[in-house]
Image (cartoon, coloured by chain):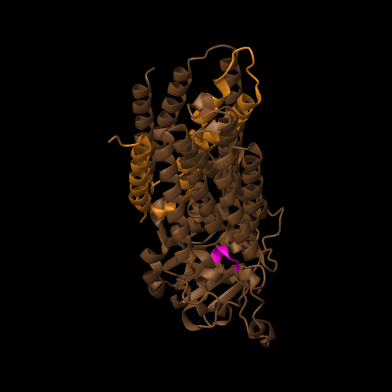
Chain colours: A brown, B orange
Amino acid sequence: MSANLLAIFYLISGVLFILALRGLSSPETSRQGNLYGIIGMAIAISVTILSVGNFSTGFLYLILFLLMGGSIGAFIAFKIPMTAMPELVAGFHSLVGLAAVFVAISAFLNPSAFNLGDPGSIKVASLIEMSLGASIGAITFTGSIIAFLKLRGIMSGSPITFVGQHYLNLALGLVLVSLVFYLCKTQIDTWFWSIIVISFLVGVLLIIPIGGADMPVVISMLNSYSGWAAAGIGFTLENTALIITGALVGSSGAILSYIMCKGMNRSFFNVILGGWGATDQNSKSSSKEQKPVKSGNADDAAFLMKNASSVIIVPGYGMAVAQAQHALREMVDALKKNGVKVTYAIHPVAGRMPGHMNVLLAEANVPYDEVFELEEINNDFANCDVAYVIGANDVTNPVAKTDPQSPIYGMPILDVEKSKSVLFVKRSLSPGYAGIDNDLFYRDNTLMLFADAKKMTEDIIKSL
Amino acid sequence: MEIDPFIFRLSIFILSIFIGYYVVWSVTPSLHTPLMSVTNAISSVIIVGAIIAALSGDNEKIFEIANLYGYLAIILAAINIFGGFLVTQRMLAMYKKKKKREK
């Protein structure tokens, strides 16, 4: 196959990948989009195999490994519960990162296979590109591993910080730049290996200071990194499919990070440089005397909702932890039978990754046209009888609008407090991830339901 | 004077960033999780590099160290490709519209 024909096929793959993302603009076209993505991938893989044209023993191993990896991937894809999507995506990012590192290593060891020159006299531009690919790939790998461990709960979600952390990162960054410089000058492989090792370290250091509540930003950011790593390798291999994909994925992750930061009214650097949890507990929240709280049981909640004409459900990470989405849908079905109008309100940073709540509700067969984003639904709270807050906390805290001292001041919130009554399902009065007390708990129109989200919802169904 | 092919690749890269920017902004927020899993799957097109790395070189010595890294990368990328596309498919199949009019 001629190089030109090959390049055209890679271009077609790239275009199909663009269409795959384009399909996601609405749920109806999304399945078609995914199909385009699969076709694009199949084309890229097939033409690459044909272009190498080596169908000896190595080819058999290639098929074997492809199927091996494929069946592991397929197995994971079918087995994974929807609540574990954030971990899964973090895990997958780490694999892309490591694959980029391996390809870069391979290109460094055997540059002639990629038309990059001979070992010891690799083109300088290629060296820069492959070091960039390897370095970003390595950062993505270890960073995603840490994110995975935090999301999985194997590692504590609280930020790990130490004195001089940012200076250390800065120093390591400078070391990386000078290593790339010396590698280009001398072509000594020690420098290449050092770049990879230091990048692994940087990946760990970048993610450990970021707290659990900031995970949506971290995941989006690592998504972006994995794209840039792919683009770096794409430049090395002079492959358009990889360059296009890398750019698409890189900008996609960057936009998601931006949306997540905006959802918390924080700058990107503020998130990167250390989480909310890092700030000491506000003394005023702990020293305040016990304020009166109205608490109720499932019967009270059922009574309130049955007699309401409209109910808005506000789900949060707690719903995912309790796996309460199915019970929730049953409760909504029961309410609808009573003629109650029910909608769902989703905050941009609800859950541990962008769109996390939407997937869980979709899994529980909630039609997506009953689920609304913050801007679409926020005005409806004023006209709604009951807001049912299940597993969300900080995203409903009115302090974000009233107290300029609060760490979440300025963050867009769901105006739950404007509804006639608020039902707040929570296990205790403890503050959320931001470590701040929620004013909403002490409002007159708030009824606290102290229980596990799933158990409470099931009890409400019983008494409906 | 001839233009370096690198400049062409750079142009493709920059233009693709802009395409990505506009395409991703048009993605509905409710599909952000599938967006992440599908971008994850397509970024595994890095497998083309792994295939070249694995199959290049002497036929007698298919497990040279450079080839080995290629094979390892094939496994990793394959997990991602199949896992990423299938889990996206599984998620997208769940998004349904209201079946019948209420009331």
Q: Does the magenta run of residues contain A274?
A: yes
State the residue lying farthest toward the bottom. A289
Q: Is residue A390 visible?
A: no
Report x, y in % for residue B12: 34, 40
| Main SS category, magenta section | loop
Answer with left or right where residue A344 lies relative to residue A451: left
Report x, y in % for residue A420: 45, 77
Q: Does the magenta run of residues contain B86?
A: no
Residue toward you, A450 or A330: A450
Report x, y in % for residue A113: 52, 24
- Seen in the picture, residue A134 relative to B102 is either above or below; the reply is above
Quadrant location of residue B68? top right
Q: Residue at x 63, y 56 (%)?
A: A172
Q: Is residue A300 visible?
A: yes
- Seen in the picture, residue A177 relative to B42 is either above or below; the reply is below
What span is in magenta?
A271-275
Residue toward you, A126 or B55: A126
Image quadrant holding the N terminus of chain A, namely top left
Quadrant location of residue A461? bottom right
Q: How many marks?
A: 0
State the residue lying farthest toward the left. B1
Q: Residue at x 49, y 58 (%)?
A: A332
Report x, y in % for residue A62: 57, 21
Image quadrant holding the C terminus of chain A, namely bottom right
Answer with left or right where residue A121 lies relative to residue B68: left
- Seen in the picture, residue A26 relative to A208 is either above or below; the reply is above
Residue toward you, A259 or A315: A259
